[in-house]
Amino acid sequence: MQKSNKSIAGYHLLMILSAVDNEFSPEEGLKIQEYLAEEFPFKMNLDNELEVIATLQPEAWKDHFEFHARCFHDDSTEKERKDFAKFAKSLIKADDEVSEREHQFYKLLKRIWNLD
């Protein structure tokens, strides 16, 4: 897998976080749109990224998530990681229900980034 920059890696992380409970709520979609507007104020075509994510089998999500967590880590400051983790938490809470799987992936992110 080719290394991603921080913004692209963040997109992958959020998309997987929103998918791990097998439901993509409108509220989660709005949170992802908020992230995209912040990270990509210019027009950005993410079709290729979305295709990669959409074709992942659920059993590959964890490895893909860990890879992009490391990509994000490599290109970010500790403050950026803390801010992203806070945003990711708001994403998984957006539909007023946090599944065990969402919580596991969120904890995995914090563990990879040493934010525990």
Image (spheres, rainbow, N blue to C red):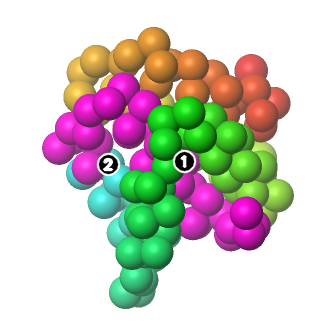
Circle 1 residue: 13
Secondary structure mostly taken by the magenta-highlighted segment of the chain: helix
Query: What amino acid type should be assigned to the residue bearing mark 2?
Result: Lys
Span of residues in magenta: 1-29
Task: Give me the residue at 68% from left, 69% from top.
Answer: 5
Viewport quadrant of the N terminus: bottom right
At numbered mark 1, what does the secondary structure look like: helix, strand or loop? helix
Residue furthest toward the bottom? Answer: 43
- Name the spot of residue 2 as percent of width and height, x first: 74, 69
Circle 2 residue: 31
At numbered mark 2, what does the secondary structure look like: helix, strand or loop? helix
Query: What amino acid type should be assigned to the residue bearing mark 1?
Result: Leu
- Lower sequence index among marks 1 and 2: 1
Residue 83, numbered label: none
Vertical arrangement, residue 63 with respect to residue 110, above or below: below
Residue 66 vs residue 61, the one in the foreground: 61
Alpha carbon of mark 1 to alpha carbon of mark 2: how far?
A: 13 Å
Q: Is residue 10 magenta?
A: yes
